[in-house]
Amino acid sequence: MAIGWDRVCLRRILPRVPGTRGSAGTGLRAQYDAVVIGGGHNGLIAAAYLQKSGVDTAVLERRHVIGGAAVTEELIPGFKFSRASYVLSLLRPQIYRELELKRHGLRVHIRDPSSFTPMLEDGVGGNPPRSLLLGSDTKETQKQIARFSLNDARAYAAYEALTSRIAAAIQPLLDSVPVDIPSLTGSSLRQRLQSLHTVKPLVQAGLKLGKDIPQFYELLTAPISRVLNQWFESEPLKATLATDGVIGAMVSPEAPGSGYVLLHHVMGELEGVKGAWGYVEGGMGSLSNSIARAAEVHGASIFTEKPVNSILVDQSGTAQGVVLQDGTEIRSKVVLSNATPHVTFLKLTPQKSMPKEFIKEVSSIDYTSPVTKINGTLALREAAIAVDQLPGFLAVPKADGMPPARCLAGTIHLNCEDMAYITEAYDEAYRGLPSTRPMIELCIPSVLDSTLAPPGCHVLSIFTQYTPYRLQGGKEWDEEQRNLYADRVFDGIEQYAPGFKSSVVGRDILTPPDLEKVFGLTGGNIFHGAMSLDRLYLARPSALYSGYRSPVKGLYLCGSGAHPGGGVMGSAGRNAAHVVLSDLRRSRWSR
C-alpha cells in the first residue's frame, strides 16, 4: 500500500508482540472449545461471553494488534490515531454492564455539540460566514437552525422526537436473533415451537411503533432526501442530516432506502445519554483492549499474528477447527468468524461443504465502498492527520457560553451546504472518478482527549466520500492517485480554514482497496456489506442463514456481516455467542 508523505515520514512505532497478547497463558494450544477468527470488537465480545460461560475460547488475529477496525495506532511518534473507526455511540449498554468495560479501563469523552457545519459564503454586514451547530441542547440547536429557517427550527424538535421513538421501538431487535423462518416453517413440531421465541421481539417492536409504523416504513424505503424535504427547507440542515443516511454507503441521498442508516445513527447512547456520540480516551483501540481484558479475566486466550488459512470441516459437514497459514491445526468444538461473509464462506470454508444456493447468495453481497480515510498515519477513505494548531475556520462557531474550541470537538461537515453537493460527489464516483468536491467529515478528537497528542498539538481524522474501489477504466489506485485525491481533500478544507495545509505534519491515506488490505474489509466496506433492505435483519447475510449459524454445523458468523450490521455496536458478537451457548447446551457437549 502506498502512503502519502507530508513533511515527515510516518512509520508505525508501536512494539510488535509476536504471536500472542501474552496475558492468557503460555501459548497457543492444539485444542479449545471455541475458536474465534479475527480480533475485531465483535470477535472479542463473542469470546468474552463464551469464556464467561465456561467455554474455553481462543481468539486468532492476523494483524500485530487486536481491534480490527476499532484500533489505535501510533503513526507519528507521540500521536495516537483511531486509524479506522473513530467515534463511539452504538455499543450496546448491556455490553458495557455485563462485561464491566469501565472496570477494564474504558473511558469516553462525550461530544456536545456533536456537529459543526461551516458555510462557504461571504459574511453580511461585516459578519463572518454562517455556520450550523447541532447538539443535545434543543433550545440552543433551534437557535442555531433559526439562522437559516424559523420554520425548520420549529420542526426540528418534532423530527427528533419521531426518530427517537422509532429508534427506541426497534432497538430490542438489535439484541435478539432474527426470526428463524426455516425453523418456523419446518416439518418438525419441536423446531417450530423452539423457534417461536424469535418472533417475540419483532411483535414487541411493532407494538411499540404503533402509529409511527408508516413513518418507519418510509424511513426504510424512501430516499433520505424525500424524508428530509418533507420536514425542512434549509439546505445546510438537510445536507448535514443526510450525511448520516449515506455515510459509508455507495448511495446518494436520492437512493431509495438511504434513510435506514440515518436511523442507525440515532440508536446509540453514552453514559446514559440517548443519541450521544463520543471519543474513546486513548483512541478506539482502548475500547477493544477493555473488551479483551474482560475476556482474559475469565481465561480467554487472545493471539496476534495468527492468520487463519482455512476452516477444518469433516466428512459430515461439521466444523472441527482451523488451519493457520503456517500449517498449524487448532481443533475446536465450534468456530466463530468475525471476518466478512465473503472471507468466511468464499475463502476460508471448503466450498464442497456448503450448498451451491448459499454460495451463490453470499457471492451476490454488495461490498461497494465510497470511503477513503486519511489519518495522521493509518486508516478508511477517511483521514487522520496531525496538526500543530486548531484549524481557523472563517465561519467561526458561535454558541452561548461555549469556547470555539469546544464547538470543534464534534464532527465538522464540509462540502455539506446542500444535498446537491453530496449527490454530485456520488455521481462522479459512480463513473469511477474520485469526487472533485468530496463529502468530508472532519474530527479532532484531541480537543477532548489530551492523551492522543503532545501538548499544543492535535490529531485529525478525515472521513471522505465518494471514492470508487477502482478508478475509471479499471485502473488501480497508486501512490500518485492517492496523493492527488488527498491534496484535493486538503484544498477543500483550506477553503473553509485558510492556513490548514501549512499546519499538517503528516498524513496516511486509505482508499477502499487499502481498507480491504489492512483491515480485511472486503471491498473496503466498513459495514461488512451494504446495509440495504435486501441485506438486513432476516436477510443478513442470507435469507436462509440470518441467525449467526451457517450451512456448516458448528460454524458461526459473529461479525458485522451478520445481523444487525455495521458500526461499533457489539450486538453481532453478543448475539452469536448466545446462539453458540444455546447450541452447545443442546448438544450437551456431545462433541
Image (spheres, grey):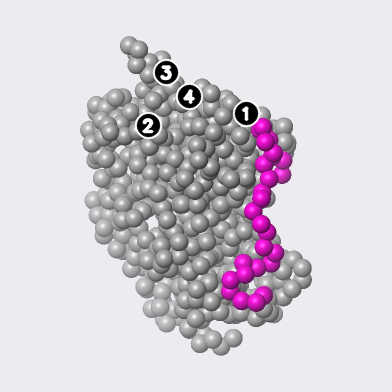
Quarter of the image where one finds residue 206: bottom left
Magenta stretch, main secondary structure, is loop
Q: Which residue sits at x=62%, y=67%?
A: 21
Pick whichever of labels 4 and 2 is earlier in the sequence: 2
Residue 5 in magenta?
yes
Pick whichever of labels 3 and 2 is earlier in the sequence: 3
Residue lying farthest right?
327
Q: Distance between the residues labelled 3 and 4?
A: 10 Å
Pick whichever of labels 3 and 4 is earlier in the sequence: 3
Helix, strand or loop at label 4? It is: helix
Residue with the mark numbered 4: 496
Residue with the mark numbered 2: 404
Residue 44 in magenta?
no
Q: Dividing the image into 4 quarters, which one contains the N terminus?
A: top right
**Magenta stretch bounds:** 1-28
Mark yes or no: residue 422 visible: no
